[in-house]
Amino acid sequence: MSAATLPALDGGTVDLYWIPLGAGHHSVRFNGIVYEALNAATERRDRRDLYHSVLEIHLPPDRYWVEMTPVPDDNGSQRGVVAEGPVGVRALGRLRTFRYEIRRWRDGIVPDLGFAVASPIRVVDDILVAQRVFDLLPQVPTLVWGRDERSTGDMWSCNSVISWTLATAGVDADSIPMPPRARAPGWHAGLALATPVLEDSRP
């Protein structure tokens, strides 16, 4: 399936996109290949293609794009930034170069969206759950990118933000399919730290 947006239902929806790591950025892609080669050798497994995830939330009449990115400037409010966190070393997070931002950008831009593979995947077609995903984003843990501070066995990354939000909202994020031969570093970390919202059981 191409990266074209799926038709929205009458209520809210959430779609997920898998984008190859470093798509459109040769240095990032090269570093990702090296990183995966070293990990595959250490874990004695075949190499896989690395992906990062992006969400599109549709709450009529608005659409929001959700992703983790570097912090390009101090105008985060214009990009719908709801949280920031440190990269690599927590103490360095005071510097913009070593911070990431989590965007919930209405009618925003995802430059690499055209490279998405096996996407979009509709993960929510219920307006209440879509609203829950939307509302949870400012509460995402802002752990150090690239580290495993909570001993989950996986690094914290952009994929952690997506999997944590979906799983905490009650979505079965563990069953979301990935492209063939894909790996999404950080996905497990988000799932491990998620605390699903309990449905209201009152009659």
Image (spheres, grey):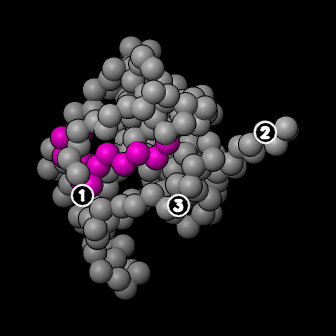
Using residue 89 as the reference point, say whether residue 33 is left or right of it: left
Front residue (pair 103, 89): 103
Q: Is residue 18 above or below residue 102?
A: below
Residue type at the position of mark 2: Asp
The majority secondary structure of the magenta stretch comes to strand
Question: What crowding class fits label 1: few (fewer than 14 Cα within 10 Å), some (14-19), or many (20 or more)?
Answer: few
The mark nearer the N terminus, 2 or 1, is: 1
Q: Residue 33 location, x and y as percent?
A: 23, 64
The mark nearer the N terminus, 1 or 3, is: 1
The mark nearer the N terminus, 2 or 3, is: 3
- Which span is picked out in magenta? 112-124
Residue type at the position of mark 1: Asn
Residues under numbered marks 2 and 1 in contact, where contact means CB atoms less than 8 Å apart: no
Q: Residue 201 location, x and y as percent?
A: 82, 42
Distance of label 2 from label 3 (alpha carbons): 22 Å
Question: What crowding class fits label 3: few (fewer than 14 Cα within 10 Å), some (14-19), or many (20 or more)?
Answer: few
Magenta residue check for 180: no
The residue identified by callout 2 is 200
Q: Residue at x 52, y 54 (%)?
A: 173
Distance of label 2 from label 1 (alpha carbons): 45 Å
Q: Residue at x 51, y 50 (%)?
A: 163
Using residue 121 as the reference point, say whether residue 201 is left or right of it: right
The residue identified by callout 3 is 174
The residue identified by callout 1 is 31
Q: In terms of image quadrants, where is residue 165?
A: top right
